[in-house]
Image (cartoon, coloured by chain):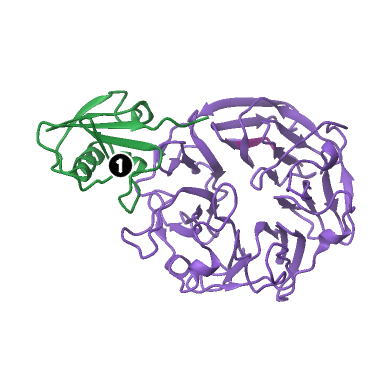
Amino acid sequence: MTEAIRLLVGTRKGAWTIESDAARAGWTVKGPLFLGQIINHFVADPRDPKVMLMAASTGHLGPTILRSTDGGASWTEAKAPPAFPKGEPHGRSVNHTFWLQPGHASEPGVWWAATSPPALFRSEDHGDTWEGVKGLNEHPKILDWLPPDGGTPDGAMVAGIAIDPRDARHMYLATCSAGVLETTDQGATWRPLNQNVEASFLPDPFPEYGQDSHQIALAPTNPDRIWQQNHCGVYRLDRPGERWERIGKAMPPEVGDIGFSIVPHARCDQTAWVFPMDGTDVWPRVSPGGRPAVYRTRDGGASWERQDNGFPKEQGWFTVKRQAFCGDAGAPQGLYLGTTGGEVWMSGDEGESWRQVCAHLPEIYSVVAAPAP
Amino acid sequence: MISVFVPSQLSSYTGGVTRVQAKGATVGAVLDDLDRAYPGLKFRVVDEQDRVRRHMRLFIGPVETRDVSRPIADGGELLIFGALSGG
């Protein structure tokens, strides 16, 4: 069964929404919102879909959080966006919020924000005011784990947050220079969780920390299963295990297992999708061979199948950033991806076929699927 | 009072007005006063460590400053510009 979807699209030049009918067949593009603002993430609260947040900045101005409490009809700016304490010992200031995460179902109004430089912030009032999470931001090893200048082209960052749906205290972070970090006390203490995850760009290729985790996702029906798209491959970890398995080794060698995002199936913990990109020589980060495709596993990563029906067969040099590939909760599950060339593509049949629903947007940073209002 | 020029990047805070009045004996104090009138404006110009953001420029009259502790005389002028950057 499917329902109407509203895609929340954040771009380098503003935000758009793309709304479907109940069959996800017809799509209508609406916008722009905040034209010219860099929107790194645009998220609706599944606990209260009228609450929506955007992580915003511009080429000139500092970062902020934009909020709507009426489903996007009106927007205001957060009273106190994420910021380090004045005079903090490392001199850090927030460059931008990268990831916005609605909190645990038991904590209405709580949101988490992951930033560049790498840090974590928490709001208890639907994103209006934010406080730093001292257990991470002031951790004695913070400059080893997450140096402010130690990262990726858009700045070192905490790139993602995952919360155990069974326990609000249990969280994971995907980071650009400490791999995956885990807390079991809601951020008071943290530890690296990176056994057997490669960091081929370091002298010790399997360090305790130092990995570049592009994205993590918990299987919705089995939160003990963690999927990870890493700078160095696709991995899976089944807790309470500690050792990740590089399931991307089963991908075709000519495609490789490098990419930014990974999407779990809403109802099957054996199934996930990735969007491989070229990770050879100078890391082109475009579809290998100019032939875009997603790859699906339906056996926990033991094997992968190519899904490219509808995508260009040649000269399709897609780049899909880590927040720009997502799924909905429909049956069959809808999949959505946005490219840095401003195209949005969708599949209504779990990846079997793809069609373009929108082109000519600015560079897409994020795509989030939410129920239509 | 200080006469403040507000650039287009910040005009959404001031209702489109590009010239406003504010009080303060230093650049930072003037920005604090502006922030009281137009909440959120200061943080988009100056970060939490009181550093002028990389792509913003401040002038006291004709003299550029990146130091928010710089004094500004009553009756003076503070000019806020977006730097020449973009794309």
Task: Give the chain coloured green.
Answer: B
Q: Residue at image x 84%, y 48%?
A: A295
Residue A191 in view in this figure: yes
Q: Is residue B44 magenta?
A: no
Spot occupied by residue A203 in the image (x, y as percentages of width and height): 69, 69
Which quarter of the figure has residue A164?
A: bottom right
Q: Which residue is mark 1?
A: B42
**How many C-alpha atoms fall within 10 Å of the one at disc 1: few (<14), some, or many (≥20)?**
many
Helix, strand or loop: magenta stretch: strand
Q: Is B54 displayed left or right of A196 in the figure?
A: left
* Residue B13 higher or lower than A82, as above or below: above
In the rendered image, which quarter contains the N terminus of chain A?
A: top right
Judge by depth and name the residue closer to the eye, B5 or A352: B5
Q: What's drawn in magenta, residue-wise?
A: A3-8
Q: Which chain letter goes with mark 1?
A: B
Q: Secondary structure at mark 1?
A: helix
- Image quarter in which the C terminus of chain A is found: top right
Chain drawn in purple: A
In the depicted structure, whether residue A203 falls above or below residue B52 = below
Quadrant in the rendering for residue B63: top left
